[in-house]
Image (cartoon, rainbow, N blue to C red):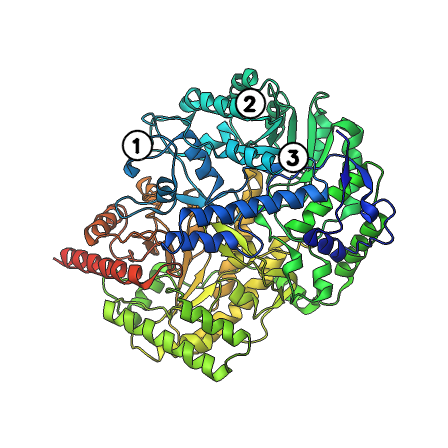
């Protein structure tokens, strides 16, 4: 398991990243000087971002979808991203280089394509799944809606949910894993193909429509295992020696029959993996003891990967139960979910402990999970100040951290690299920019009070209706309107000082005026201002709060071509001045209809940022809640009667361990209530959530005590409504989404009527709102206008019928 690594002095990305970490090639005795060889332990990466350092894949995808580029153009960009990634990993000395972690949209969708599990509505005729079918499943087409999209565990990444039932005819329909392995081999890189494991794939799926009550996904194991065998056989024939199966479902609280499925699956794969070394990779949480016992006894498995960052108890589990002598342990000590530089000394101590348990020859240094969830390269950041930059490590830098740790474990410790890292750790802990005692004091005092509004939601709704005078089934949208190229250019030019502040304000006012006029023409009941001044629903607020830092190219994939640039919360959070009042009041002055003040809630700002890891998350969340509370009070004082505080990420942050969920929901719900506990009964508080399974936290949602909640509903085929079928009573206003905004497909009016009627079957007509699933930022006006026209028409039709 030992190898020799040559460092190239001529690779720009690697050398710049070394420089950032204090790497001094002149003082390094056995490093890249003269290209001499360095002995190192084995190193491994679970996965890597696929969007490219400057979002090259995003732009290629959108060009392809718009018909401006062809398939060959898209494939060329993808191939360049893959080859440069493999080259970077190899030149850093990585032993286990992953392949097939690249995806044109989503890795779970890739597995669906591999298994040929294409729903009938896409009229697939068999053979290899092509771009047309693949992107139809992801985005929908003119005749068929997209497959459901939901959060990947507790991350802000979205995956495409497989739709499986007894009728699915599986076939080996995408050879992507094999072709990418061959592609890497032709370029001179030996890689480890990465595939979603069979049991996790089934557990991540949902039953096809109509079989929900009686169908078990495990009945499909005997149908998909033969395809996995085919894939393994092809990979072995192509020369692969290692294959990685990602089985993240093992970190959940699984039942005995679910654990049994893992044992049976790998037992069936054992004969076909002869000659191959199989890694089973887990991540995002601890391995429960029962799952650990199952995992460590799986047949045909040569290595097991653990997340030792979020899995804080896993090391104790390994100590307690031991580790098989014939297997390799892939130790995920470098954080794949956050961008703070690794505490190398602490990680090395953990690795030394593991070395004492499993032995030097069986220990591999790795990331805690795929680096998909981090920004790509710190070298591309030109505006971060030096102090904060010294505290960070993006994906490119994490490659180096993994490899320098593996070298240190082999006795080739780079003292200069470790010393620079140690200095950065001390700098961060002692910086006066991090701690604000007045903010800490105010936030700590919040934990002891309840922060409920004084009156019940039913009485508030009556008071608000007298003031707002809304019709039955009021219509609204959820914040953003399309962000056109002209609008984005205006914001860029303002940031670059190419236009004056006055010119910028006038341009944004003009855009707001257009959005207000459009909503009046559409006859929508409660308006939004369209958010033309906002780049992102979290970044926009973070830019105006203390304790946040921002990147230029710190992009992270959220789904498909959608990328976000999470702010970095490095210190205590406070609000120096109002953030949204000017734009909200500007819009309200243009119409007599109510315009919602649009805010992002504290839990969502927390979960969609790179959060400081030097204090508990709930303390940071309370600080953000206080800042949003100040904004809510200023909006109300300025005459805004309806305020929406989005908590899209409430469910996303729910811990994977059931034993930890109650504590999280307590402080998350309390944080939301803090933001609006002081408003008058006449002020209507809305919130919004999307693209997660909310049914299992419905009690917490009710406890948020919002006046109106809007929740994604259409893309998930009314999954939300099932909770009301089961007898849950909801007395506040509620707007289950009536159409999917993540698809270019325009729903017909009668389709929306049918969807609303399903809602009326379980919800009182007096509390029901009509709105899309989510904001309209990613859509075009040519899609938005007809869709909203049909939505309003559907509401009016049903309004007249209910009136009669």
Q: Earlier in the sequence, mark 2 or mark 1?
A: 1
Q: Circle 3 is placed at which residue position?
A: 306
| One can see residue 693 in this view | no
Q: Is residue 531 left or right of residue 727?
A: right
Q: Percent x, y for residue 597?
A: 41, 70
Q: Circle 1 is placed at which residue position?
A: 125
Q: Earlier in the sequence, mark 1 or mark 3?
A: 1
Residue lying at 58% horizontally and 71% vertically, measured from the top left: 575
Residue 435: quadrant of the picture: bottom right
Q: Percent x, y for residue 63?
A: 41, 55
**Disc 2 to disc 3, C-alpha distance:** 29 Å
**Disc 2 to disc 1, C-alpha distance:** 28 Å
Q: Secondary structure at mark 1?
A: loop
Q: Earlier in the sequence, mark 2 or mark 3?
A: 2
Q: Percent x, y for residue 507?
A: 41, 78
Q: Which residue sits furthest left?
A: 804
Q: Circle 2 is placed at which residue position?
A: 237
């Amino acid at each position: 398991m030992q190898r020799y690594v040559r460092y190239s002095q001529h690779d720009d990305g690697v050398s710049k990243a070394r420089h950032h970490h204090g790497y001094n090639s002149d003082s390094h005795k056995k490093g890249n000087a003269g290209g001499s060889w360095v002995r190192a332990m084995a190193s491994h990466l679970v996965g890597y971002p696929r969007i490219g350092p400057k979002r090259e894949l995003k732009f290629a995808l959108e060009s392809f979808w718009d018909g401006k580029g062809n398939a060959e153009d898209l494939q060329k960009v993808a191939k360049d991203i893959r080859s440069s990634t493999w080259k970077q990993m190899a030149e850093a000395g990585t032993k286990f280089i992953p392949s097939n972690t690249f995806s044109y949209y989503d890795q779970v969708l890739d597995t669906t394509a591999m298994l040929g599990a294409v729903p009938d509505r896409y009229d697939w005729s068999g053979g290899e799944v092509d771009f047309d079918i693949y992107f139809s499943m992801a985005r929908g087409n003119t005749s068929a809606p997209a497959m459901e999209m939901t959060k990947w565990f507790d991350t802000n990444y979205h995956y495409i949910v497989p739709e499986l039932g007894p009728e699915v005819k599986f076939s080996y329909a995408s050879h992507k894993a094999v072709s990418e392995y061959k592609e890497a081999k032709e370029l001179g890189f030996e890689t480890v193909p990465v595939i979603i494991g069979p049991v996790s794939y089934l557990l991540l799926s949902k039953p096809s429509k109509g079989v929900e009550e009686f169908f078990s996904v495990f009945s499909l194991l005997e149908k998909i295992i033969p395809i996995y065998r085919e894939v393994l056989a092809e990979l072995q024939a192509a020369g692969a020696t290692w294959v990685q199966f990602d089985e993240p479902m093992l970190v959940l609280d699984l039942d005995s029959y679910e654990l049994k499925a893992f044992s049976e699956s790998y037992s069936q794969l054992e004969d076909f993996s002869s000659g191959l070394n199989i890694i089973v990779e887990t991540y995002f949480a601890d391995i429960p003891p029962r799952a650990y016992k199952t995992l460590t006894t799986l047949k045909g498995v040569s290595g097991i990967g653990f997340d030792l960052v979020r899995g804080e108890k896993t090391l104790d589990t390994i100590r307690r139960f031991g580790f098989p002598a014939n297997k390799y342990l892939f130790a995920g000590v470098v954080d794949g979910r956050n961008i703070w530089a690794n505490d190398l000394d602490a990680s090395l101590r953990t690795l030394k402990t593991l070395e004492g348990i499993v032995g030097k020859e069986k220990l591999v240094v790795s990331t805690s999970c795929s680096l998909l969830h981090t920004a790509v390269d710190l070298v591309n950041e030109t505006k971060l100040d030096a102090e904060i930059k010294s505290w960070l490590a993006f994906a490119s830098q994490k490659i180096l951290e993994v490899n320098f740790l593996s070298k240190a474990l082999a006795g080739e410790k780079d003292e200069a690299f470790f010393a620079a890292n140690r200095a950065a750790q001390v700098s961060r802990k002692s910086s006066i920019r991090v701690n604000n005692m007045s903010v800490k004091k105010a936030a700590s005092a919040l934990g002891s009070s309840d922060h409920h509004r004084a009156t019940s939601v039913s009485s508030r709704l009556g008071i608000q209706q007298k003031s707002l005078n809304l019709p039955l089934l009021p219509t609204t949208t959820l914040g953003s309107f399309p962000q056109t190229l002209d609008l984005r250019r205006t914001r860029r030019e303002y940031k670059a000082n190419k236009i004056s502040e006055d010119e910028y304000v006038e341009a944004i006012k003009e855009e707001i005026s257009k959005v207000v006029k459009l909503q009046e023409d559409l006859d929508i009941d409660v308006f939004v201002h369209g958010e033309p001044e906002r780049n992102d629903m979290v970044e926009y607020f973070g830019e105006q709060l203390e304790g946040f830092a921002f990147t230029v190219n710190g992009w992270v994939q959220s789904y498909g071509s959608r990328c976000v640039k999470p702010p970095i919360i490095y210190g205590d959070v406070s609000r120096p001045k109002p953030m949204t009042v000017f734009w909200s009041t500007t819009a309200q002055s243009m119409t007599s209809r109510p315009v919602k003040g649009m805010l992002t809630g504290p839990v969502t700002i927390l979960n969609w940022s790179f959060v400081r890891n030097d204090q508990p998350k709930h303390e940071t969340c309370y600080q953000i809640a206080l800042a949003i509370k100040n904004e809510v009070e200023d909006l109300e004082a300025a005459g805004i009667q309806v305020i929406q505080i989005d908590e899209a990420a409430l469910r996303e942050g729910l811990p994977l361990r059931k034993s930890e969920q109650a504590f999280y929901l307590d402080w998350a719900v309390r944080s939301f209530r803090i933001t609006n506990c002081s408003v008058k009964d006449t002020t209507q508080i809305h919130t919004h959530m999307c693209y997660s399974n909310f049914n299992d936290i419905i009690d917490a949602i009710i406890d948020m005590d919002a006046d109106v909640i809007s929740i994604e509903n259409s893309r998930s085929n009314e999954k939300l409504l099932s909770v009301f079928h089961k007898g849950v009573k909801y007395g506040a206003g509620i707007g289950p989404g009536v159409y999917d905004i993540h698809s270019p497909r325009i729903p017909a009016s009668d389709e929306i009527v049918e969807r609303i009627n399903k809602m009326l079957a379980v919800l009182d007509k007096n509390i029901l709102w009509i709105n899309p699933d989510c904001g309209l930022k990613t859509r075009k006006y040519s899609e938005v206008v007809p869709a909203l026209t049909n939505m309003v028409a559907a509401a009016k039709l049903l309004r007249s019928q209910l009136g009669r």
